[in-house]
Amino acid sequence: MIQHTVAFRFDDDVDAVAFWARVDDLASIVGVEQFTVMRQVGRKNDFTDALSMHFASESEYAAYNSHPVHTAFVADVWKPSVADFIELDYVVVDHVVVDR
């Protein structure tokens, strides 16, 4: 399972209503599981919002990245709206050994 999360901050003059109206398009892509929209409540960084989703496999994640709905969202909605972001992709590990 891959958890894909992107935390971001809108441009100052963005139409956030238009952005949020289109974000559910991403949840409709085959392979997207546990689609979650989050709002930042901490003050440790400048990101204000985040999207998170899970994929059962690398191939489903790759299919999502190249899916026409995703690529259109990035070009038409994301790039004109987002000032800064960080993308985080994780897999759960059973045990981590730290060599010190």
Image (spheres, grey):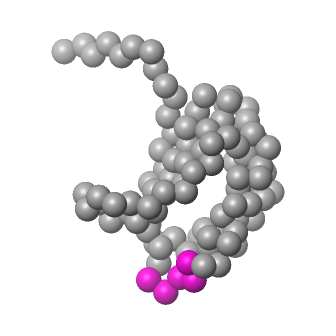
Instruction: Please indicate whether residue 34 sits to the left or right of residue 51 in the image.
Output: right
> Is residue 81 depicted above or below 92 in this figure?
below
Q: Residue at x 32, y 13 (%)?
A: 97
Q: Residue 94: horizontal and vertical position, in percent?
A: 45, 15
Q: Looking at the picture, how far across and down is residue 1, in whole percent?
A: 60, 28
Q: Specify whether residue 62 is in view.
A: no
Count of marks overlaid on the render: 0
In the rendered view, does 73 fall on the left or right side of 8? right
Location of residue 17 by image quarter? bottom right
Q: Which sits in the foreground, 56 or 74?
A: 56
| Image location of residue 63, percent across then percent down | 76, 42
For image coordinates 73% across by 36% down, the residue present is: 60
Q: Is residue 94 left or right of residue 99?
A: right
**76 part of magenta stretch:** no
- Residue at (77, 52) in percent of width and height: 28
Quarter of the image for residue 75 reads bottom right
Q: Answer left or right for 90 relative to 30.
A: left
The location of residue 95, given as percent across then percent down, is: 39, 14
Residue interval drawn in magenta: 12-16
Residue at the left extreme?
100
Residue 4, relative to residue 20: is it above or below? above
The secondary structure that most of the magenta stretch takes on is loop
